[in-house]
Amino acid sequence: MLSKKPKLYLASESPRRHALLRQYGIPFTVIPNLLLNEILPQRCHNIRPFLRQLATEKVMTSKNGFEGIILGVDTSVLWQDEILGKPRDLEEAQTILKKLSGKTHDVISGFCLLDTRSGKKITRTETSQVTFNALDKETINVYCQTYKPLDKAGSYGIQDCPEILIKHLKGSVENVMGLPIKTLQKALRELHAN
């Protein structure tokens, strides 16, 4: 039986994930994500296995030298089987937001937890659905100039979206931010129980 509660290591530089873990009182230490080639298909009907695999690869490449629980996460925006990643430039961000305008899309996160002491591993995915209002060109342009869409999958961050963008959210807002925190808490309890 393993003794004291293990340390949690997050293999991610995402400020949104850091903020969520702090907000929910989960102590963690950031470590480098050493997975250099994060390859996902451009189109995919069921992306969940890919996200779990990608999160697992992040953990497995980043775990060396750390004793405790390693957390790897990946979040994707899926619209009509098309994976919308981080835009390359503002023009692409505007194109992506135009696609999402007036429609519903899925935001899916996959994570992997690995206890390096016991070798136990847990992977999970969670899906939220976001419906955008119909957006005109000016609204899209103002959003792109104001809210820095280039570091966000799908070209937007739910945490800084003005109300005019979002019509409806079904599921976890934290998942849309990049970390399904309540599902993660349950998985951490599972690891600690063994």
Image (cartoon, grey):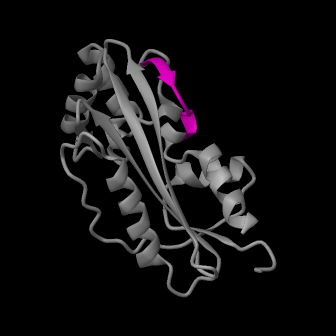
Number of labels in the image equals: 0
Left or right of 147 in this view: 98: left
Q: Residue at x 47, y 73 (%)?
A: 32
Q: Which residues are magenta?
A: 166-174
Q: Residue at x 53, y 73 (%)?
A: 31
On whether residue 173 falls in the magenta region, the answer is yes
Toward the viewer: 102 or 126? 126
Spot occupied by residue 105 in the image (x, y as percentages of width and height): 34, 28
Where residue 132 sits, quadrant-wise, is: top left
Toward the viewer: 94 or 123? 123
Q: Residue at x 45, y 47 (%)?
A: 109
Residue 56, above or below 154: below
Residue 146, above or below 19: above
On whether residue 7 falls in the magenta region, the answer is no
Toward the viewer: 184 or 15? 184
Spot occupied by residue 123 in the image (x, y as percentages of width and height): 50, 58
Where residue 188 sits, quadrant-wise, is: bottom right
Residue 47, above or below 66: above
Q: Residue at x 56, y 34 (%)?
A: 172
Where residue 2 sits, quadrant-wise, is: bottom right
The single residue placed furthest to the bottom in the displayed view is 65
Spot occupied by residue 78 in the image (x, y as percentages of width and height): 30, 36
Left or right of 106 in this view: 30: right
Left or right of 126 in this view: 100: left
